[in-house]
Image: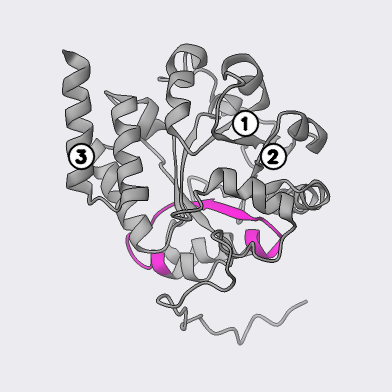
Amino acid sequence: MADTDGLLDARDFGTSGPAAGGFHVKGAHGQDWGLRNRLSRIFRPNTGRTVMLAFDHGYFVGPMAGLERLDTRIAPLTPAADAIMMTRGALRTSIPATTGAGIVLRASGGPSILRELSDEHIALDMEDALRLNAAAVAIQVFIGGEHESRSVSNLAALVDAGQRHGVAVLGVTAVGKDMVRDARYFRLATRISAEMGAHIVKTYYVEEGFETVTASCPVPIIVAGGKKLPELDALTMAYRSIQEGAAGVDMGRNIFQSENPAGMLAAVRGVVHDGLKPEEAYEIFQEKTAGAAI
């Protein structure tokens, strides 16, 4: 067993230093061509960033508000996203095969919202991900959760399969109701995911120390949108995330539960790819909302 008594808190994160390698996706310069090509379907080569639209919530909560009809409410939004994250069932039934967005498939599942959520298993075979032309597969990692060890083992098994087939793996840091959401926890959770081989990590933004989370993770971090916020607040979170080292956002409720989902998606793109400040992006949202009402 490792001696943990004398561990020192990490201090020198080098937050201003450039990432190693010449590829536009952090930490991927040594990967095979196919995997780098798939990562390029998610992260724009000209910015190294992504706007991912997540609508995989139904795999454990069912048809939540905004996701009642994926074919009519979500499918029209997908052309404006760099990548889309969903289950294979949603992809096959509701998303046109003509989409140009990078496909990120939910690969873990098991319990519903009525049970212990950390009790997940791998729920997608990599061969099916290849049949669906996925750029990446996503799996929850429950650091500090009841089934932490299994979730980390699930991640490792999926990474092994992903490396064999050239498919990227997105590790999603799942936070339980009783867990502390601070930079120290997210440094732990994101670093474990990356050390186990995840090519991308999705986590939450925190106002204090988030730059240390992104700096200490050797692969790109994308920020979860989380609960529905007022549009300007969500754009502010996205802006701060990017300014503090995130490589993009993976938003769901803050887009599909917005008054104008298409307008909100355009505003988020302005923040992530064009460097707009929150107030400038919010003007885009207001203009598109006003135009849609005419």
Q: Residue at x 73, y 49 (%)?
A: 34
Taking the view exactly as shown, the residue that stands out farthest to the bottom is 6
Along the polypeptide, which appears first: circle 2 or circle 3? 2
The numbered mark at residue 187 is none
Q: Amino acid at mark 1?
A: Arg
For the residues labelled 3 and 1, say whether their Cβ atoms are less than 8 Å apart.
Answer: no
Q: Is residue 111 left or right of residue 150?
A: left
For the residues labelled 2 and 1, say whether their Cβ atoms are less than 8 Å apart.
Answer: yes
Q: CA distance from mark 2 to mark 1?
A: 8 Å
Where does the image place residue 117, in percent across and percent down from the top left? 61, 37
**What residue span does the magenta drawing correspond to?**
193-211
Q: Amino acid at mark 2?
A: Asp
Q: Is residue 146 visible?
A: no
Q: Mark 2 sits on what residue? A: 119
In this rendering, the answer to whether 238 lies above or below 228 is below
Q: Mark 1 sits on what residue? A: 115
The numbered mark at residue 282 is 3
User: Which is nearer the eye, 186 or 268?
Assistant: 268
Where does the image place residue 256, in percent across and percent down from the top left? 39, 26
Question: Element under label 2?
Answer: loop
Q: In this rendering, which labeled residue sits more in front, label 3 or label 1?
A: 3
Q: Residue at x 55, y 31 (%)?
A: 100
Q: Residue at x 26, y 49 (%)?
A: 236
